[in-house]
Amino acid sequence: MPVAHIDSYYAASAHPAPDRPPLTGDVEADVCVVGGGIAGCATALLLAERGYQVVLLEGNRIAFGASGRSGGQAIVGYACSQDKLVAQVGPADAKKMFDITVDALDLVKALVARHRIDCDLHWGHLHTAIKPRQEADLRAYQEELVNEYGYTSTRWLDQAELGEVLNTDRYIGGLRDDRSGHLHPLNYTLGLAAAAEAAGVKIHEQAMVVGIEHGSTVRLRTAAGPSVRARHVALCCNAFIDEKISKALRDRIMPVGTYIIATERLGQARIESLLRENVAVSDVNFVLDYFRRSDDHRLLFGGRVSYSGRDALNTANATRVRMLKVFPSLADAKVDFAWGGHVDITMSRAPDFGRIAPNVYYLQGFSGHGIALTGIAGQMVAETIAGQAERFDLFTKLRHRDFPGGPALRTPALMLAMLWFRLKDLL
């Protein structure tokens, strides 16, 4: 039986997609991509467009993980501050890394247009401040973007100007970025997969990789038995990376649960009375809230997190309570969908891209900034396999630490650390 996508608003509004066959016999390819999220589908597509013979193996279904469940916000920059990048690679390379995130937004736009992907893409994003300290931080960030990185697409909105966009008293100001935006992540990923197939990629679902044998030709064994032999491999497993593939990669990320609700259809007039423009919004708390409109006039609202790896009790109601702090007038609105998933975070929140062998590349640690960054990461892998590694190798300079404590203690240790950040959000 085919594995179904998690019950969510995205799955309920997804475009039809075929069930791809499992791998039934040994095959050979120029490149084997492991993982059918945005990173994997983009990598496969962009390699196939360069003329490579590509096989993509997905253990569940295309976009089964975060790529089919996330908040759908495509945002410039990284989950970590630029200062963290500067400290490791210096200002010049940190500037190049920032520019890559700008290119990532342009790539989303280009892929959607070139392959006619119907994914409700809209431009406009707001980072909002709840407290004066956060306002000062956002204003300083805007100055850094302009002065250090030449990024001039943002403008500050004071409380009155913000009120013309958002009908809420929760925020005292916001940084608007019309180059960032939002989309339907499941339909975007399904569109990339369809484009990859049209370019010649062979996609196999329910083809879980359980072993990898390195060499000039790499052999990847699947749970059902058949294998793929390829000259190059791209591991795009993210939160689903298994120790059987690489314990070292698994130890450097932590799957973090996050949750989203979707209200009933509110109607155009009501949703536009709350969000007068179709922009995505996220506050700047460490445990943040994020929300946006859907094209069928729902409010999609997310932000609760679980560092224990377990779904919190009554997640839908707890997330609804957070939504009502922003929009109290939705007290009578029914919640039609509630779902969760995992994002893969690194200790530093910087992305973790590199090689575990000369011909085996990996992409992980998007830390909640995956909608745009995954696509450009796939493009960088394609460039590297084709012989141009300059952009990809920028990220191999970043040092990443294992999460402390090993399998038994890493989660409790992280939960204690997160309690401190939650307390800081309240100050």
Image (cartoon, grey):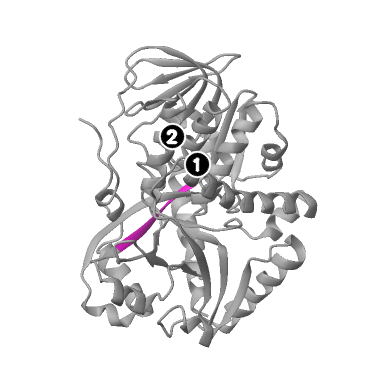
| Residue drawn where x is 59% and y is 47% of the image | 351
Q: Which residues are magenta?
A: 254-261
| Residue drawn where x is 51% and y is 19% of the image | 53
- Give the crowd class for mark 2: few <14, some 14-19, many >=20 residues within 10 Å: many
The quarter of the displayed image where residue 259 is located: bottom left
| Residue drawn where x is 55% and y is 37% of the image | 378
| Residue drawn where x is 31% and y is 19% of the image | 224
User: Residue beneath label 2, please?
Assistant: 195
Q: Which mark is residue 114?
A: 1
From the viewer's perspective, is the residue at label 1 or at label 2 nearer?
1
Q: Amino acid at mark 1?
A: Arg
Q: Are marks 1 and 2 in contact (CB under 8 Å)?
A: yes
207 or 52: which is nearer to us? 52
Q: Position of residue 232 (x, y in %)?
A: 57, 22
102 or 135: which is nearer to us? 102
Q: CA distance from mark 1 to mark 2?
A: 9 Å
Q: Position of residue 350 (x, y in %)?
A: 61, 51
- Quadrant occupied by the N terminus: top left
Q: Amino acid at mark 2?
A: Ala
Q: Is residue 258 on the magenta stretch?
A: yes
- Give the crowd class for mark 1: few <14, some 14-19, many >=20 residues within 10 Å: few
Task: Specify the principal SS of the magenta part.
Answer: strand
Which circle's residue, 1 or 2, is located before the other in the chain?
1
Q: Is residue 36 left or right of residue 74?
A: left
